[in-house]
Image (cartoon, rainbow, N blue to C red):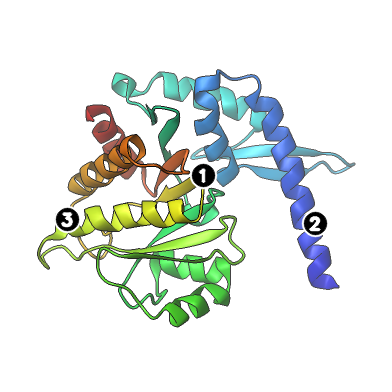
Amino acid sequence: MQGELEKWLEQRERKILEEHMAQVLEQVPPSCRDRLRDLLRQKAQLRRWEHGGSFVVFPFDDGWLPLDRAVVRLMESWCQEKGGVPMEKKVGDKVVALVQGDITEMDTEAIVNAANADLILGGGVAGAIRAKGGPEIQEECHRIGGTHVGGAVVTTGGRLKARYVIHAVGPRWGEGDEEEKLRQATLNSLRRATEKGLRSMAFPAISTGIFGFPKDLCAKIMLETVLRFLAEEDTSLERVVFCLWSQEDLNLFQKTLQSL
């Protein structure tokens, strides 16, 4: 009973939050809506007035702002981006987008976990996926048993916002043939999403953490692979997002996307 009540309250608050955001999104240029929607869904929070009613706030480094003022500030910031560096790129009727944030909070239909070959969800992002998504994700990984470097497998998303987790095994820098292995990990993730008939998915910068893959090379390989796949393959995917943890990573992927 308690669990059902908590779930109902969570769903109700999410619906109210979405309604607040929808009102704001109607007021911004259409070309900015997808980017703004992704960012708001990751970071905006619902707050309650003391005497009833609700409002939405958004965090900045210097504090929280009400949603309407936050949107103005974000739009002004984007207008000032150096060199007009893009946050998304069209591929026919499909889109590749870049956002900064926590991939475990993405509500794309699938998120990609930069996995190890044994599919053990240890620390870092994988640990956060396990903690937020629940034990069923690791249990399904155990049933699968592992995969090769460059491979990708799909499990449930458990309690995550994403319905599925695609576990992609990237290479360790220095093990040999790293570029092709990263390309295959990216490509196989896209194939798994297509096999499920998914319309959206989110990637991290695979192998750039403890596996030591150079970030600039990762950005080039992964973005090229995704752009080519969307242009040439028959896929259900309509939107592929790269969710980068740091501003530095986001800037790097922006510059790489601009060059492609």
Q: Position of residue 13 (x, y in %)?
A: 76, 49
Residue hosting label 2: 9
- As rendered, which of 228 and 96 lies closer to the eye? 228
- The mark found on residue 199 in the picture is 1
Q: Position of residue 164 (x, y in %)?
A: 52, 60
Quick one: label 2 or label 1, which is nearer the N terminus? 2
Give, as a three-letter code, the residue at label 1.
Arg
Residue at 29%, 20% (x, y): give it. 83
- As rendered, which of 183 and 126 lies closer to the eye? 183
Alpha carbons under labels 3 and 1: distance apart: 26 Å
Residue at 23%, 64% (x, y): give it. 211
- Residue 32 lies left or right of residue 2; in this view the side is left
Front disc: 3 or 2: 3
Front disc: 2 or 1: 1
Q: Secondary structure at mark 1?
A: loop
Seen in the picture, residue 87 relative to 175 is either above or below; the reply is: above
- As rendered, which of 47 and 111 lies closer to the eye? 111
Alpha carbons under labels 2 and 1: distance apart: 28 Å
